[in-house]
Amino acid sequence: MVTEKLAVIGCGKLGAPLVACLAKAGHSVVGIDINKNLIQGLESRKILWHEPNLINYLETYKDSVKFTSNFDENLQGVSTSFIIVPTPSDSNGVYSIDFVLSAVKNLCEKITDSDFQSHTIVIVSTVMPGDTEGRITDAVKLAVGKNFEKFKICYSPEFIALGSVIYNLENPDMILIGQADETVGNKLEKTLVSMTVNNPAVLRLTTAEAEIAKIAINSFVTTKISFSNQISEICENFSNTSSANVLKAIGTDSRIGNSYLKQGTSYGGPCFPRDNRAFAKFAETLGISLDLALAADSINNRQKNRLNQLLDKIAPRVKSILVVGFSYKPDTDVYEESPALNFVKSNLDYQIYVLDEHIKGAKNLDGVKFIKSSDLSKIEIDVAILFVPAEAYSELPNELNKNAVLIDFWGMWGKYKGLESNNYIKIGDYFGE
């Protein structure tokens, strides 16, 4: 394998793992971020979020990594730069690329000070279709002037989730390359494949095709989740049925597949909700109503009402609720648009306790008490709701008072059904009147 000197612009929760995986693959990597506190933390191997294997990789391959907040440093000889900065949604649901444009400007102004034959800029951040060939390319032209012919611009998003970023980078289902031309696509493919430990499919598209594919894939996943929750709703209201069994049967059909087809919570987090909305907004600019994406969002939003209605049935004896898992998925401390956060916000009339192995508190949730498992013996819990199917919570009912009602989105606590005085409710199973 040919090793390269690479730069990663943006060293946050996605960028830092990308640095680590490129270094593990044998490349020399410069990680650049304007957040000096973040850079200092990465240099000292002290990060403020939870990501499995990140610290281990950064320490193991430290000789191949340099972090800096200064674009003037260490760009000599860099052949490819990956831009993986935030693209937050604006008030219309469209991705803002202000951080991308700023990164492009800073990078190009410094790269052109070096003697180089060519430089590849890879946009990893999720952007709207048309942005790479449009405003991003225009920004490069403006920054480099007559040197523009030496620059190649590609779009290659990663399909990664917080809490499993390194695993996802090393074991992707596919590598998606929106290439500037075939030659630069060949080069980028070798770099990206070098990080993997499996044998992923490599798809070479135009940049616009790759931009559409990125948000369309996530939109389709949200559709499967909302479809699953519809089946879950049906089975809760039809005797002698379990959505887990029905969904397994549906997913066994090779035309459909079992991935993401299971009963559980609504979708949340920093990607799925906004990607679905952005896809609908993009279609709207073409005069197309993306009814399927809009329906997935509508079904997702009503899931909170299902749980509230269930609580109303048992409300006369419910005063305190234990929320088990506050993040949007296992192995992360991110709770942006998480199902648990949405539930807590709409149920502050109860005494809410929150137990999460990675999160110790949250802003603007007055009266909500974040606790440790050791605190459970000291408090009376009426209802415990499993939002996050992390193994750490599998035996939690043993630590609760025996009269607590267990509400289980994922079927992890099924072995406690019917034991002693526990009332067990599995979301997606018929539980009668």
Image: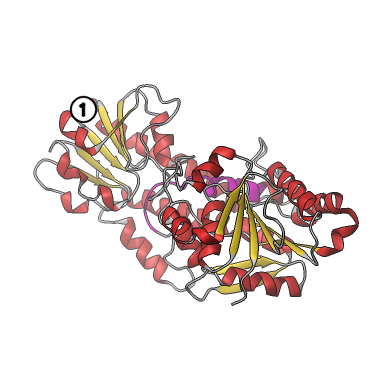
Q: Looking at the picture, how far across and down is residue 202, in whole percent?
A: 60, 73
Query: Residue flagged by tag 1: what amino acid is it?
Result: Arg
Counting every numbered tag in the picture gives 1
Q: Position of residue 83 (x, y in %)?
A: 66, 53
Colour mode of the rendering:
secondary structure
| Image spot of residue 273 (x, y percent) | 54, 46
Which residue is disc 1 drawn over?
A: 317
Quadrant where the N terminus sits is: bottom right
Q: Would you place residue 373 above or below residue 20 in this image?
A: above
Q: Is residue 166 left or right of residue 358?
A: right
Rendered residue at 51%/47% (across/down): 42
Q: Position of residue 93 (x, y in %)?
A: 65, 41
Q: Residue at x 24, y 28 (%)?
A: 318
Dot 1 lies on which element? helix
Q: Is residue 366 left or right of residue 296?
A: left
Visible in this render: residue 299? no
Q: Start and end of the magenta stretch?
A: 262-280
The answer to which quarter of the image holds residue 2 is bottom right
Question: Which residue, as the protein is rendered here, is positioned at the far left?
Answer: 420
